[in-house]
Image (spheres, grey):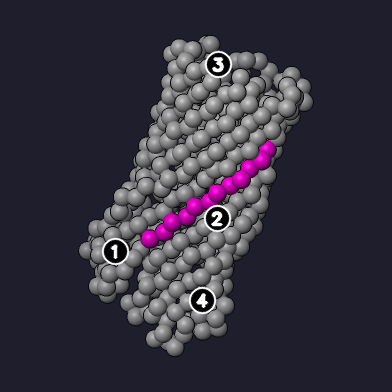
Amino acid sequence: MKRLEKLGITLLLLAGLTVGLYPNGLNLNGNGSKAIGMGGAFVGLADDYSALYWNPAGLIQTKNTTITLFVSDVIPSGTYKLDAYGIDAETETKHYITPGFAFVRPLSDKVVIGFYAHVPSGLGAKWKGDQLKMLTSGKTYQWESMVGLVSFSPGIAVKLSDIFSLGATVNINYGLLKLKRPINALIGQYEEDLSGWAVGATFGALFKPSDKFSMGLSFKLPIQTTMSGTAKIPGASILGLPGEDDAERAAEWPLWAGAGIAFKPTDRLTLTADVHYTNWKTMTVIEMDFYNQGWKTYFEEGANFEMKWKDTLQLRLGMEYKASEALALRAGYYHDPNPSPKKTQNILLPEITYNFFNVGFGYKTKHLTVDASCEFGFGKDKVIGFTEVDPNAGMPGTHGMNMVVPNISFTYNFN
């Protein structure tokens, strides 16, 4: 019972990641079609609306009022094999649509303001339950997770000199977590539906001594939040307990920091490189709290879960080539390491080391710019033996995950 109960706790971590930190797991790794097309190596360039996510100081480069509509479709494909139980399972094909809207307005040549409503994370996994029934004494249950977050980010950039700017956003985040999984063959299906608010902030700096070179720094503050809602266990009646209870989970979300450079060796070519750091080592305990005393006794045991994660660095590279005044071609790559140890791996939060390859383009007219890109994430299978897992949290076997993420944005320029 403990092991599967912990899956819900682990899933809260996924919700915790949705403050726009873009780490490993079921989260998106970028925002804005131009930035994604360049592998998310955008902290040192940050020259469109998505600077409100990557580096708000970059807003200062906006010369005219713009509005943008952005949409991304995350399509994950997961596999799980456990030969000892004859399990060879895969996720169902699902599309996780994540929209966005941005408004940017220069107040002067030294002050630019903006607002970005977006979904920095929106993903999950839905497994074919009949392929996992050997985990639950031959009975078929639902195994599904879905996490999303909507962020409302007003921001400002200020030019302090001809070559140096600072920027900041306030990130007002609304997150939600939905989870379906079995507890055990006796109690049966468990469902959870939680949501909550969290407020954070992003700060950035941009140093641009010339049109050919710029460098940027950006960081997001750690925050704490509580997500609350309801949990359902129809089989709880076997123990004389109600089938539904109020539930609450608390988590501390870590610091994220990014540094990047942009270099233009020619008027047509732009090269970028970023390093992104996430302080995952501070992510240690995620607490669970039920209100009913019986639920506390039978279902909350061991709810304080040690993640034992490690800090990670993402390395990102990008390029843009202007084939003409109207058309720009883009490509990028980044390495996304897995922050978790084998002992906490499970199928509802496939923590995999990825290599992402990105391509994209931009087409500009007098008033309208269309940017589109697609990233292809190739996960490295994670093989875990029975003796390598925490029996209260992990699942042995071979875990795999790949994903495809097409996206497009339309920006109207009021020039």
CA–CA distance in space, label 2 to label 4: 20 Å
Q: Which mark is residue 25?
A: none
Q: Which mark is residue 264?
A: 3
Tell me the chief SS of the magenta region. strand
Seen from the viewer's position, the closer of residues 261 and 409 is: 409
Query: Mark 3 falls on what kind of element?
Result: loop
Rendered residue at 77%/22% (across/down): 161
Query: Mark 2 falls on what kind of element?
Result: strand
Query: Mark 4 falls on what kind of element?
Result: strand
Q: Quadrant of the C terminus?
A: top right
Q: Which mark is residue 129?
A: 1
CA–CA distance in space, label 1 to label 4: 25 Å
Magenta run includes residue 289: no
Range shown magenta: 144-155
Q: Amino acid at mark 2?
A: Gly
| Residue bearing mark 4 | 245
297 is higher (above) or lower (below) than 326: below
Please identify the quarter of the rendering in which residue 406 is found.
top left
| Residue bearing mark 2 | 175
